[in-house]
Each structure stands twice: as C-alpha cells, then as structure tokens.
Amino acid sequence: MGDVLAGINSSWEFDTDSVLIRFERGIRTPKLFHVLGERRVPYEALRSVELTPGARRGTVVLRAEPRPGADPLVEAAAGQLRETSDPYRLVLPVEREPLAASFVSELHSVLGPWADEPADRHLVAAPAPPLQFKAYDGKVSFDGRTVSFRWFWTGASSAKWKAGDQTFAVGELRGVEWRSPEVMGGHLRLIRRDARDDQPPEEADQDPAAVVFGLGYGLVHESLPLAASVLEAIRAAGPDPALEAATAATARVNGPVAQVRPAPADIADRIRHLGELHEAGLLTDDEFSTKKAELLAEL
C-alpha cells in the first residue's frame, strides 16, 4: 500500500504486509501513547478492521481488532483500556473518510483465513517497558529475565514484609494478571507455575507475588507495558518441565523457594526512607532502630 493516514494523536503507515502505527507526544495525547512511540502490526495479527462515525461531530474512527493472543499489550490489558487510549483506534477528520474507506477495503482483501483463529504466538512486539515503576506497596522492576518486588515500609502489608522482597525468574511464571490502576482493586499479579487453579488467589495486598496500585501509583502508562513485556517473555520462554518439577519438590519439602538477596543499593534506599519517616515523627526511635537492624542483616 505504501500510504499514510494521519489522524488525531497517531498516524497509520500502510505497507505490503503490515501497518506502522506512530503515536504523537502532544500534551493532550494519552501518556500510554508516549510510551508506545510506534508499533508495527503485521496484517497477520489482525482479526478485523472497520470504519464508524466518531463520537465527536466531524470525525470518523478507523479501528482494527487484533487476533486473540497476537498482541501481549492487548492480552495484558484484557479490555480495560479507555477508548481514548486504545492503540488500535484512529480518529480522523470526516473529510478523510473516503481515503480511510479505501484502506479498509484493501485491508479486508489481505486478511487471510487465519483472521478468525487465535494466534499461537505473539505477532506484535511488546513495548519496551520502563526499567521500574512504583506501585503503592512496592517497587517493581523487570530486566527481561527476572521480575523483582521491593516492598515499601509505608505501604506493604505485614504478610509481605514477613515474606520479604521477591524475585521471580520468567521460567517460574505462567501468566500475568493486570488490573487497571484506574479502578478500585488495581494490581499487578504474577501467576506462578506452581499456583493451584482450584484455589482462589490471595488478596493482592497479602500476596507476595502481587503489588497493589493506588492513586498516583502504578499508572497505566508505566505498569501496562511492563506487564505486557513480562507476558511476552513468559510466552517466548515456554514451559520448563525440569524447573516446574524442582519448584514443586522444593515447595513440598521446604515451603516457598528461597529469594535472591536484595542488592545493597536497595537496602540503602530503604534505610534512607526509614530515616525520613523517623525525622518526620512517623517512626519511634525503637521502631527505626529495629527495622534498620533487620535491613542491615539482609546484606
């Protein structure tokens, strides 16, 4: 096709086998689009495409729908994104409707018999995640191989403090549960391979494999790309029978798998944070000394 369709907040550049979606970085553009930058979507990843009247007078909307399982971002979002933050939605001035209609017609012609089938692998790359983000009760980081949770003294439950900071190798995981920070109960939960499907999960604020969101913590544009990247890594890694067997055996004999020792820099950050709370009068001398000693013992 080789043409560009410019809309509000993004533009679509059509190629012979894919569409390149470029997102703007304007003040009114959703912050998620700032993080996404641009995404190349193979036509093989699409299920359908349609053109409909826009919500605002004088606009039309071109919207594509990816096949189930084709895009880790959409899979992680699980239908929770606001309409204005939908990366597969292009809002256009009504005068561009004829051109948009011609693209829709061409796209319909290239959608093959696979369109109605779930994808057996991710066909769209996950966005590059932030190195870390802050949730309400902890800091989350992902380096492509492991996901780490570092609990905050002010937000984490006693159950999480008792469990200690957590580090999960991608091979230990079989899924990710993301609940938008924009609703009550928002959280990011890692689903471990040894988790039992016949038991309901713990509340997120008690689960050492989950962080909870709150107002201003774990924003969509920070947390969703990371969740999608973890999901992509899990799918790419595939099941590891040896690791599953070892994890299950360790859990039966010794309880939870031992966690990686926290980095000295993380311990130092947490001690500085405790000092700030102490200076603000939110911790007594005894509480500060006790917790500081516990953190130093982890080194």
Image (cartoon, rainbow, N blue to C red):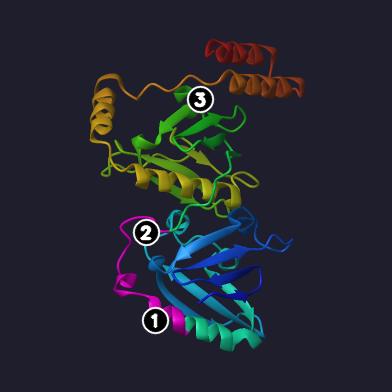
Q: Mark 1 falls on what kind of element?
A: helix
Q: Nearer the viewer, residue 237 or 54?
A: 237
Residue for point 48% across, 29% down: 160
Q: Which residues are magenta?
A: 105-123
Q: Is residue 279 above or below residue 53?
A: above
Closer to us: 108 or 274: 108
As measured in the structure, the alpha-carbon distance from the residue carrying label 2 to the one carrying label 3 is 35 Å
Where does the image place residue 36, in percent across and percent down from the top left?
A: 58, 56
- Residue type, label 2: Gly
Vertical arrangement, residue 98 with respect to residue 17, above or below:
below
Q: Residue 5, image x and y in percent?
A: 60, 76
Q: Is residue 47 above or below residue 183?
A: below
Q: Earlier in the sequence, mark 1 or mark 2?
A: 2
Label 3: which residue? Answer: 161
**Which amino acid is tagged 1?**
Ser
**Of labels 1 and 2, the one closer to you:** 1
Amino acid tagged 3 = Trp
In the displayed structure, does residue 259 sit left or right of residue 212?
Answer: left
Please name the residue that numbered disc 2 is placed on.
69
Q: Is residue 66 magenta?
A: no
